[in-house]
Amino acid sequence: MSLTHAARGLALGAALLFGATAAHAQAPAPTAARPAVQALDERPASAIFIGNSFFYYNNSMHGHLRSLITGAGDQRPFSGVSVTISGSGFEWHDVESYFRPNAVGSYTFDADNNIVFNNRARLFDIAVMMDCSQCPIHPRLGPVFTDFAKRHSETVRRHGAKPVFFMSWAYADKPEMTEQLAEAYTRAGNENNALVIPAGLAFARSIRDRPNLNLYVADKRHPSLAGTYLAAATTYAALFGTSPEGNRYTAGLDADTAAFLQTVAWQTVRDYLGTRRAGN
C-alpha cells in the first residue's frame, strides 16, 4: 500500500474513531495499527540512545530521563548515554560498533564529576533508536527505515540488549506527519518485537489540549525545553510503565507546565500501550 493510500485510510479511521478535528487539533492516538509489545519484561538499568539532534537538544534527553527517575525517588541505578549524529537517519549509525567492549558507556561521571568505571555483564539493557524526522514516511527513505529497523534490532539483540523505537513528532507546520509517523513506527515495532515510545502522539495531544504551549524552536522541527521535557516524560512512562505525574523534576519549567506535560505523557502512554508495568 502506498503512503498516500495508507495516510487516507488512517485519516478515515481516525475520523470514525475520534470525530473530525481541525488540523491543529489532531486525535492524539490516530494510528490504525496497535502495538504488539506493551511493556519491557524487565526494568532497564542502562540505555543507549541512538539518533540525532532531536535527542541531543536541550542538554540531551537521556539526562532529563535520568533526572525524572531521581525526581520520582527511585534509588535504583540507571545509566544512559547518547550516540547522536546531526541530521542522521538509521543507516548513518554503525550500531555494531557501539557495543564494542570497553568503549561506549564503559565509564560515567558521578555527582562529584569523578569517573566511575562500569563493570556490567552487558553494556546496555536497551537501545532506544530514532530515524531522521522524515525518513520513515519519505517515499525514497521509507524502505531504508524498514530495512535498518530490522538490521539494528538484530544487532542490538545479538549483544544481549532489547531494541526500543522512539516515535518522533510532526513538524509544527505539518501536523499530518503525526499519523504517518505513528503508523510507521508502530509497524516497525510490531515487525521487530520492539517497544515503541509514542512521543509523537504526546506532542499531538499537548498541541490539541494546550495549543499556546510551544513545543518547538524557531525551525518548527527541533524541541523547545518543554518539548524535550514532554519527550523525556513520555519515555519514562513507556519504559517503566509508571506515571510521571507528581514528579519533582521539572527541568526549570513552571510547575503548572510541568504538571500538564507529565499528565499528557502518561495519558498518551496509557492510551497507546496500556498500563502494564515494566518487569522488575
Image (cartoon, grey):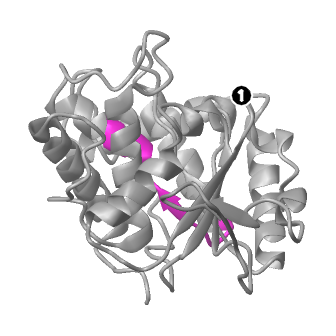
Could you tell me residue 70's position as x and y percent? Answer: 34, 64
- Residue 46 vertical placement versus 167 (above, below): below
Quadrant location of the N terminus?
A: top right
SS class, disc 1: loop
- Please identify the residue farthest to the left as the structure is shown: 256
Identify residue for label 1: 86
Q: Residue at x 79, y 59 (%)?
A: 104
Left or right, 195 with respect to 239, comes to right
- Please identify the residue farthest to the bottom as the structure is shown: 280
Front residue of this view, candidates 186 and 32 = 186
- Residue 227 vertical placement versus 129 (above, below): above
Quadrant location of the C terminus?
A: bottom left
Q: Which region shows up in magenta? A: 191-203
The type of residue carrying mark 1 is Ser
Determine if the magenta segment contains residue 238: no
- Residue 33 vertical placement versus 182 (above, below): below
Could you tell me residue 85's position as x and y percent? Answer: 75, 34
Could you tell me residue 217's position as x and y percent? Answer: 42, 16
Q: Residue at x 26, y 67 (%)?
A: 72
Left or right, 158 with respect to 177, comes to right
Could you tell me residue 197's position as x and y percent? Answer: 47, 56
